[in-house]
Image (cartoon, rainbow, N blue to C red):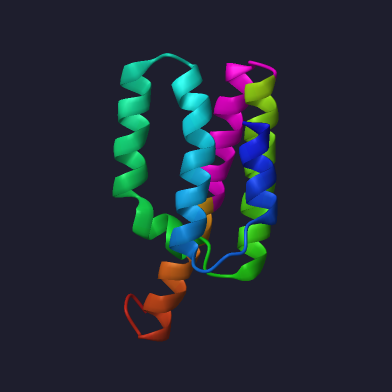
Amino acid sequence: MMTRLAELDRFEVESERSYLDAVWVYKLTCYESAERPRLLETVSLLVRRLARYNALALGDKHRLEESLVFQRRFGQACERRDGSAAELVIREAMDWSSTYLTEKVAASWLSRGVGA
């Protein structure tokens, strides 16, 4: 897993989509190691369904760098086999993305006079 993390650190981002594909390959190692097929199936489905939102959440360069911080923390928790810490990092990352997307959508609506 840490090898995959090192690859993410060196990753030349061609697009948010290619970065997100690399992140999934990185996280897949952890989910497969957990030997919990239903968890893997659920997470795989969510990754596919949320792909466009995840790409939007990485729209600004600084957000990609912040995403890497979450990936490092997740990897460290997995290396320690600390499921609670890994879950906490994933929840924090989801909240980080959700807050950003909510603000971005609200700003877009306001700029178009929707809901004003």
Query: How many numbered circles does the render carry?
Result: 0
**Nearest the camera: 99 or 83?**
83
Q: Does the magenta stretch include residue 85?
A: yes
Q: Is residue 37 above or below residue 67?
A: above
Say left or right for 22 vs 42. right
Residue 16: x and y in percent read: 49, 63
Residue 39: x and y in percent read: 37, 22
Residue appearing at x 30%, y 27% in the figure: 41
**Nearest the camera: 47 or 101?**
47
Image quadrant in which the C terminus is located: bottom left
Residue 102, can we see it?
no
Residue 21: x and y in percent read: 45, 51
Q: Is residue 61 magenta?
A: no
Residue appearing at x 52%, y 57% in the figure: 19
Residue appearing at x 63%, y 69% in the figure: 61
Q: In this view, does 102 lie above or below 49?
A: below
Dominant secondary-structure state across the stretch colored magenta: helix
**Nearest the camera: 96 or 74?**
74
Image quadrant in which the N terminus is located: top right
Residue appearing at x 35%, y 85% in the figure: 113
Residue 30, can we see it?
yes
Q: What stretch is highlighted in magenta?
A: 80-96
Q: In this view, does 5 lie above or below 115?
A: above
Say left or right for 45 vs 58. left
Say left or right for 81 vs 114. right
